[in-house]
Image: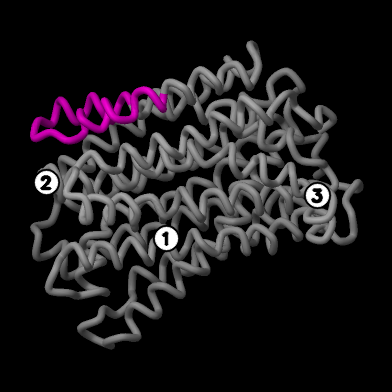
Amino acid sequence: MNSNSISLRKIILIGLIGNVMEWYDFAVYGYFATVIGKLFFPAQDSTVSLIASFGAFAAGFLVRPLGGLVFGRIGDLMGRQKAMTISVMAMAVPTVLMGVLPTYESIGIFAPILLISLRIIQGMSVGGEFTSSLIFLVEHAPKNRRAFTAVWGNWGGTLGILLGSGVGLIVSESLDDTELFNWGWRLPFVFGGLVALTGWMIRSGVHVEAPSNTTKSPVKEVFKNHKWDVLRIALLNIGGGVGFYTAFVYAVSYIKNIDKLSESVALEVNSLAMFVLLLVLPFAALLSDIFGRKKILLIASATLVLCAIPAFHLLHSSQEETIMIGEVLFALIVGMVSGGMAALNVEMIHPSVRCTGLAFSYNASMGLFGGTTPLIATWLISQSGDPIAPAYWLVVANMISLLTLVFSVRAIKYQGI
């Protein structure tokens, strides 16, 4: 079956299904970071354990640029679908293994070593999955609906995080603290194997021809002739990445450890915010198609800069309703930032090195800034004693992206997809 015989709905399903799995696992890890920290990085100070746990989380992101080069090269030389099929299995196996991994009490120092090793494999997998799926979607989209088509890659990732939050909420409410600590935290990781199997079956059953306009040495070509495009894309994605991981991954830990509310309340609030994000993303993408990428992104990025600190004050509360308002506000603004960004990322990189160039630039940005955000936010609060400190990091990150958007992104460079 070639790409011409596949309906747009099928194209969207192929593009988004892998992201459900990829981001489900990352969400589950972030949501159970406190438990994982105590089991794999035991310390007298619980903050030290949490920082170590988020350090392992960050390790999976720091290798994403390397994974981007590996899977990007596969995507440019062998086809986008091949890269997506391999990457989803490279995520599935470590996810299931994490659910049966012995803890520090059982095997000592080998427990955190194995955990970090699995996170690194997963990070490399994500380095190829997300950007390959965005490229696949944009390259098969109608010209006037590229943003609306590409956004379903983000939508799949958001659905995966919501699924992870929902499963985490069910496990947390069904078990007491002792059961959750002893074995309950493992269940969401094992369940992830079923999600991965579904994604693999959908993707392996469809054949899409590999692109014919690629270079024989995409990695060399990217750094020789397209380095400024790579830098622009990386800077452009810093703000949205930090915003996303602040609002939808770190926030769960923040609500539990800073606001002192229960695990189930934190996951309930987060699940509602993720549901709002699912509604906002397609709407924001349509606006981007109609009014232009840059105009919508300028408004959304500037709003995030202005609202980051007030929204964090709402997040820092003992009242569930107030926290929920803060989380929903973040969902609305981050959704508007993300709506047109997916298509813009693809449109800014040359077709011959698109998988390699976008995978490296996007993942370098997410790895160095987005994925380290929970670690940075935890450290900032521990050093300053200011519970609003993560908001300042969020403002700085979004100012970088906003200035890049104003001064560097004059037009979509590669309209010919």
Relative height, residue 154 to residue 210 (above, below): above
Q: Secondary structure at mark 2?
A: loop
The quarter of the displayed image where residue 75 is located: bottom right
- The C terminus - image quarter: top right
Kindly report which numbered mark, 2 or 1, lies closer to the viewer in this rendering: 1
Q: Disc 1 designates what residue?
A: 58
Q: Colour scheme of this structure image?
A: one colour
Q: CA distance from mark 2 to mark 3?
A: 47 Å
Kindly report which numbered mark, 2 or 3, lies closer to the viewer in this rendering: 3
Q: Position of residue 239 (x, y in %)?
A: 48, 37
Q: Secondary structure at mark 1?
A: helix
Q: How would you rate the neighbour count of disc 2 (Cα within 10 Å): few for under 14, some for 14-19, many for 20 or more?
A: some
In primary-sequence order, the first of circles 1 and 3 is 1
Q: How would you rate the neighbour count of disc 3 (Cα within 10 Å): few for under 14, some for 14-19, many for 20 or more?
A: many
Q: Disc 3 designates what residue?
A: 353
Three-letter residue code for mark 3: Val
Q: Is 339 displayed left or right of 347 in the figure? A: left
Three-letter residue code for mark 2: Ser
The residue that appears at 34% across and 68% down in the rendered structure is 99
Q: Is 37 displayed left or right of 73 in the figure? A: left
In primary-sequence order, the first of circles 2 and 1 is 1
The residue that appears at 41% across and 26% down in the rendered structure is 304
- The N terminus - image quarter: top right
Q: Which residues are magenta?
A: 304-329
The residue that appears at 65% across and 16% down in the rendered structure is 292
Q: Secondary structure at mark 3?
A: helix
